[in-house]
Image (cartoon, rainbow, N blue to C red):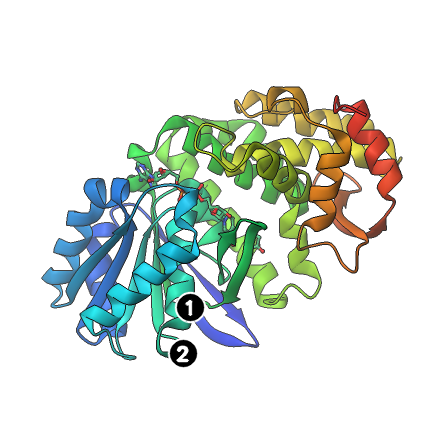
Amino acid sequence: MTIIPVSGAGFQTYDVVVGRGLLGQAGQRVAPLARGRTVIVSDETVAAIHGEALRASLEGAGVRSEMVTVPAGEASKSFAQLERVLDRLLEIGLDRRDVVVAMGGGVVGDLAGLAAALYMRGVDFVQVPTTLLAQVDSSVGGKTAIDTPRGKNLVGAFHQPRLVLADIDVLATLPEKQLRSGWAEVLKHGLICDAAFFDWLAGEGAAGAMGDPTALERAVVRSVEIKAAVVGEDEKEAGRRALLNLGHTFGHAIEAELGFEEAALAHGEAVALGCCMAFRYSARLGLCPTADAERAEAVIKAAGLPTRLDQAGAFAADRLLALMAGDKKAEGGALTLILAHGIGQAFVAKNVDADRVRAFLIEEGAAG
Ligand code: NAD
Ligand code: GLY
């Protein structure tokens, strides 16, 4: 088991605990924060598989719990589900000393975190991430949000959790597509700032993508260390935190065009493809060695993740460009992209020329 503290100037330090069998320890770890009562927010799939274990652990430590579930899937990051969750918290009579426990993937963490930020002007919440993506990324750093028909994550708040419990054992029930999707975010961390970690992920660590718990634990620990360091420096994304968006501007545009549907690309798959595109674009501009872009692509491909636009569908360059410019990382209409000087050397590129990106998208197979 490893405990990684997340500290920053603007928030109370909290621990991310990574290890095996943590669901069974949730009660003893949450009890000091909960003063007697919690509401678990989960999705129907996760609640059916792991809900009872969490409830039993909480009750064993003398912590009462209520369960609120939402349908599984991105569509639950909506005003309608946010209102439903908040209404249930009011109905239950949660007070400001009680704790919301978000048990699930990034969808539940983002939705329950936002509900906790808004309820009575903010109550404490604990993240129990059950997807690899949530363990390595969304449960750490305090970004919470819902989607609107105008785009993803456009309504939200920074609200840091008080504790994160990342139990590697819960990943055993995760569908393979979701495991791969989370692996993309792990690879992303190596690509951003840790070439040695990327080497390990490409070699010995690759077993994690197949579900090996020892490799997964090491991959989660290193990813959380990287994310904790970035968030500690720049909680509100004034600068360095934007690096964590490597692959996201291309990826979000592709996801948006596909409609964020269950049958379409999982979030991490879109990020994997976006990372490949960011590296290829960096190489095309002469900013990054072509060999690094090719290696990034080969390792992502070996993990069973998409690397080429045509694997995701057919796209029009203008449409993707418009979606990229509408991404909330765009500043004053100018395109901001995360590019790279090489593996482990990502940087924020502002005022990127839209025409060059359009030409690149056509080279990548989008219709002109
Ligand atoms: P998700 O929450 O939809 O979970 C994926 C699927 O796996 C769901 O059907 C869920 O029911 C199921 N599932 C979850 N845990 C399981 C388990 N242990 N066993 C079996 N099934 C399980 O998706 P996700 O990929 O975890 O998260 C994606 C979301 O995260 C997106 O909305 C994205 O915007 C958000 N996100 C947020 C941040 C952030 O910093 N807040 C960062 C990255 C991504
Ligand atoms: N996933 C990007 C961030 O947390 O900033």
- The residue carrying pointer 1 sits among few (fewer than 14), some (14 to 19) or many (20 or more) residues within 10 Å by Cα, namely some
Nearest to N terminus: mark 2 or mark 1 = 1
Q: Which residue is mark 2?
A: 121
Mark 2 belongs to which amino acid? Arg
In the image, the residue with mark 1 has its CB under 8 Å from the nearest atom of ligand 1 = no
Q: Relative to residue 156, is residue 190 depicted above or below?
A: above
Which residue is nearer to you in this view: 343 or 120? 120
- The residue carrying pointer 2 sits among few (fewer than 14), some (14 to 19) or many (20 or more) residues within 10 Å by Cα, namely few
- Badge 2 element: helix
Residue 134 percent across, percent down from the top left: 43, 47
Task: Give the CA separation, mark 2 to mark 1.
Answer: 20 Å
Q: Residue at x 66, y 35 (%)?
A: 274
Does residue 292 appear left or right of residue 269 in this picture?
Answer: right
- Badge 1 element: strand
Q: Quadrant of the C terminus?
A: top right
Q: Residue at x 71, y 36 (%)?
A: 320
Q: Residue at x 23, y 58 (%)?
A: 26
Q: Relative to residue 160, is residue 195 depicted above or below?
A: above
Residue 80 percent across, percent down from the top left: 38, 56
Name the mark nearer the viewer: 2 or 1: 2
Does residue 214 appear left or right of residue 286 in this picture?
Answer: left
Residue 212 percent across, percent down from the top left: 38, 30
Q: Residue at x 54, y 32 (%)?
A: 269
Report whether residue 225 is seen.
Answer: yes
Mark 1 belongs to which amino acid? Tyr
Report whether residue 278 is seen.
Answer: no
In the drawing, what numbered circle is on residue 86? Answer: none
Residue 173 percent across, percent down from the top left: 29, 33
Q: Which residue is mark 1?
A: 14
| Ligand 1 placement by image quarter | top left
